[in-house]
Image (cartoon, rainbow, N blue to C red):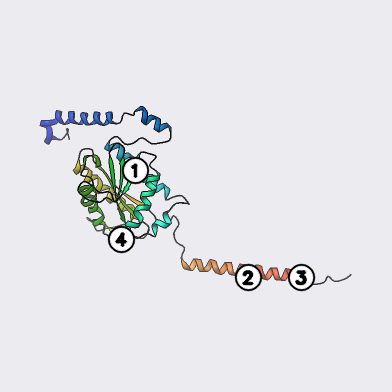
Amino acid sequence: MSADPLFAHAKDRIAALAQERLAEETDASVISMEELARLFQGSELAPMTTTDMAHLLSDRLDDLQDLMGIDASPKAAWAKVTDENTLRPAIARELDMMSKGAYTVDQEGVTVDGKETDIRFRALSRYQASIELKIGEKPRTGKELRDTIETQLVKKYMAARNAKTGCLLVTVADSERRWHHPDTGEPMDRHQLQNMLTEAALLAQQRLGGEARVMARVLDLTPRLPKEPRAAKASKQTVKTKAGAKTAKGSRAASKTARSPKSGK
């Protein structure tokens, strides 16, 4: 902003304020001996600034997506859920298990304005982060999902000074699911949806200014391997049946041969 010609008259003041904000965040991130001890005990440092909270939330969402890639993940079960109220506690439970003492997790926490958030991180430092959960298979358009960032996440949940971190989390279980881009009308798959929502989140963050951090994530619940066509399954089953019948026939023939008396010499 200090480089913008429109603010040339306040260039020095803007630069000074930026330096002051940076110094405040740096001071706030100084680790105490108690926190250092907790770190050595396997706990994680609690976020001390909005930036810290944003990094923490981003890391946990990365961990959540990584969890979907292991064999023992709840991905298949989550993919069958069609209601946010049912999926929310399951996701909140996983995020809580990842906390390592850095935060607690609330479901449907109430803001100062009486608005209920889907999932909220609360750090010991009083900094908070909100997650707005949407299931991608519901009949929502790309525009509705994009508008959720501004109308719900930003305006309802990120008003407080210590709650300037938020993320729209959209789960997608159907690899064939498509949305239309609100501006171009072009069809979007889940990857293109992620790009569109990320752009919208960045614009919302710029409008908020200051230390606000706005994110959007698509949690991929699609199966790693495509479903096998029925014809292929039927063909494999036929081959297995024939192979089984041939094996059984061979076994009976061998048994019959073994039971028949040997010819004398």
Residue tagged by mark 1?
Answer: 104
Q: Secondary structure at mark 4?
A: loop
Picture coordinates of residue 145 (x, y %)? 26, 55
Residue tagged by mark 4?
Answer: 138
The relative height of residue 92 versus residue 15 in the rendered view (above or below) is below
Front position in the image: 31 or 59 = 31
Q: Alpha-carbon distance for marks 1 and 3?
A: 73 Å
Residues at discs 1 and 4 in contact (Cβ within 8 Å): no
- Disc 2 residue type (three-letter): Ala
Residues at discs 3 and 2 in contact (Cβ within 8 Å): no
Q: Alpha-carbon distance for marks 1 and 4?
A: 29 Å
Looking at the image, residue 151 sits to the left or right of residue 232; the answer is left
Q: Please name which of the two marks, 1 or 4, marks the residue nearer to the observer.
A: 1
Q: Disc number at residue 245?
A: 2
Picture coordinates of residue 18 (x, y %)? 20, 31
- Disc 4 residue type (three-letter): Lys
- Disc 3 residue type (three-letter): Thr
- Disc 1 residue type (three-letter): Thr
Q: Please name which of the two marks, 3 or 4, marks the residue nearer to the observer.
A: 4
Q: Disc number at residue 145?
A: none
Q: Alpha-carbon distance for marks 3 and 4?
A: 64 Å
Residue 163 lies in quadrant: top left
Residue tagged by mark 3?
Answer: 257
